[in-house]
Each structure stands twice: as C-alpha cells, then as structure tokens.
Amino acid sequence: MSPRLPLVTTAERRHRLGRRHRLAPSARAATVVEAADSVVALHATDAATVFLSARARLTAGGPAAVEQALYEDVSLVRLLSMRNTLFAFSAELAPYVDSSTARAIAVKERRSLLKHLDEDGQGLDARWLAEAETAALDALDALGPTTGSQLSAAVPALRQKITVGRGKKYETQTGVATRVIRLLAADGRIRRDRPRGSWTSSQYRWVHTEPWPPVPAAEARAEIAGRWLHAYGPATEADLKWWTGWTLTDVRKALAAVGPDQVLLEDGSTALVSPGDTGPEPAPEPWAALLPALDPTGMGWADRGFHLDPAHKAALFDYAGNIGPTVWWNGEIVGGWAQRSDGEVVWRLLGSPGRGAGQAIAAEAARLASWVGDARITPRFRTPLERELVA
C-alpha cells in the first residue's frame, strides 16, 4: 500500500503567496533583488511592471531604489527569456537564465534575420551582419548609453532597409536596426540602460556589455526549475512548461534533477513541491496587495484556479491572456484597479472578500498612489475592467 500524500489545502497555497512572494507586510523584502528573487523574476515587457511589482514587495524605497538596482548596481537585469518574453532577473540568476533559455532564443533570432536578409536579395549575409554588429558595438563604446535611433544615426549599416515577404500579400519594407539591436541584446552583448523620460518609459538607451558566463544548459534549467518550484509550488509540470516555454522533455529532465515531492490538493489532484517542502506554511497576518498588469504572482501558473474565480477572468485578462492590474486579499484576486489621468488610484471589488478587506485595500491603494507620485500608469495590455475604471 502506497503512503498517503501530504495534503496542501487552498488556504495553505494562499498562505505561501503571502510569505514567499513577499506580499504580506511582515514578509516584505529589504532590497529590490530580494523582491525579484522571491518570484524568480519580475515581468518586464511593460516598463512600469518591474517598478510596481518591486514596490508591492518592498518594505521601503521609491522608484529610485529600483533604478539603482537596474542601472547603477546592475544587480537586476532585463533578459529576453521565458516564453520569448522580457523579464528582470537578479544578476546572480542571469547566467542560468541565459543558458537555460536565452541562448536558444538568440539562435532562433539570428537564423530568422539571416533568412530575411537572404530572401531580400541585396546580397546581405552573415558577414554583413557581423560587420554591422561590430560597428554598433564600436559606436556604443564611443558614445556611451545610446538610444536605438541615436545608434542608427551613428551606424550607416543600421539604416539599411530590406523587404520582408517579397511577392506575398504581407510584403513590407522594414529597417534592420531594431532586429540587429534585438539580436545583440539576445546574445548578451548589449543591455538596456536608463530610458529616455521617466521610469515608465520603454524607450531604453543601450550599453555595450560582456556576455554572461556559460553554464551547462541542463544545470541551468534545474536551477531555474528549483527556484520556481520553491516560489510557486504546489504546481505541476504543465505549469512549469507554460511558465518557461521549454519543451516537455526539458521540463521533465529539470524536475527530475530537482527531485520534487508530491502533495495532494483539495480537488483530489496531485502537484509538486520542493524536496521536503510538504509541511504547513504559517498563516501571515491579513494582507492586501495592488499588483500591476503582468505581475508574476498572477502569471505564475497555467492553472490559476486556487487564487482566481473563473467568473472574474474575463474582466481581468485581455484577449491574449495577459493579466491586468489586480487587487488581492489574503492570496486571492478579488478585484482590479487603475490609475486615472489625475493620478487617483481607483479599484473595484468583484464579489465580497469579507470583513476587513475594504479598509486594508484602501490603505494599500493610498500607499501605491503615494509611491507613484506624479507618474501615470497605463498598462501596455489593457483589460476590460481597467478600461472601465478610467473611463
């Protein structure tokens, strides 16, 4: 007779979010890097998300603290990685992300660009591309932090235009600058520096940097899987596959290297946790959080049923499955929020979260508004509830 699996209740899973994701006040992080590591990475497609996700998890410090980590200490770095999406990782974890995920993306990006160059028919090839990349790096060395448009102005090759899809209905002429810059970034030879404008801007300057030290890919995937399982477990291999974008084979090999334990969930299904991580998590104090669009806590699993009522999904997600700004109460999504043009942070509950929620959420909304100050937040991927709140 096989031993009975430890039971992890839905309440227990929500307790873990409060503590491990640094969202309960007593569990908040002292540094931006600690905040990022608590959820493995901060989503970075939308520039503001990195800042607002860190804010929700920090004991103190304003936007300048996040800028310090990103641009002065470079202890937090943006990498094109999981699901071919931009994330911000600690510099300690970055080599593992690079080897486990970003290398494959870079190879695919280079293959795609070379294919477009060949089909364009102007004789542009791998040698031309290598020379263009070298010229771009030389320009960055001479100019210092430089925007994409400034780099194009300085490097004639980056002003080259090619025709994509020649002879097809979607034929279009496009410049190569964005593709070459994206490739250099994917290769780890340049990184995003301070943007033009405020911390909400995605118009980054670029600087020349050294590629990350190589790590064996299997070792790197095991490191990522282990950290993810600690932050997001109980979870399934399907959740990890969705979160990483790895093949199922790579997911299974990474999990085998981690050696997770199995637990039983309330619905009768089984899930995985870190080795030995089957005991109960102490319940934190009641907590409220206002998390930004694409925050990792809302995007950590393929199946979010334990913290989201399916009836609320249509209001809080866009058509592509991107989560919008959300209101949390004790580990459950209970509503959404938005910032109006005058700076006011407004929110709406979806259902009745219970006693004490309203006052705590209002206090957290005030904390958010004070932190944001004069900045204005409009998510890149807008959701139905967010649009309603600002109308």
Image (tube, rainbow, N blue to C red):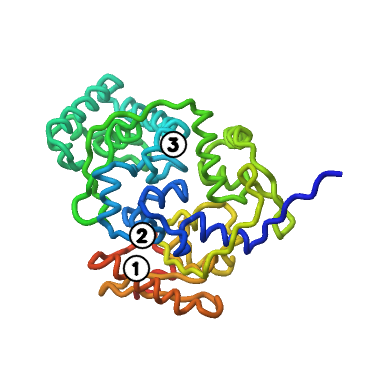
Q: Earlier in the sequence, mark 2 or mark 1?
A: 2
Specify the amino acid type for callout 2: Arg
Q: Earlier in the sequence, mark 3 or mark 1?
A: 3
Mark sitting on residue 349: none
Image check: 197 left or right of 52?
Answer: left
Secondary structure beneath label 3:
helix
Specify the amino acid type for callout 1: Leu
Which dot, 2 or 3, sits closer to the camera? 2
Percent across and percent down for residue 238 are: 61, 45
Task: List the residue tagged with mark 2.
Answer: 55
Tell me which corner region of the image, top left, top right, bottom left or bottom right, holds residue 158: top left
Task: Count the marks.
Answer: 3
2 and 1 marks in contact (CB < 8 Å)? yes
Tell me which corner region of the image, top left, top right, bottom left or bottom right, holds residue 110: top left
Q: Earlier in the sequence, mark 2 or mark 3?
A: 2
Classify mark 1: residues with Cα within 10 Å, few (<14), some (14-19) or many (20+).
Answer: many
What separation in Å lies between label 2 and label 1 (alpha carbons)?
A: 8 Å
User: Which residue is rendered at x = 71% and y = 60% of the image?
Assistant: 266
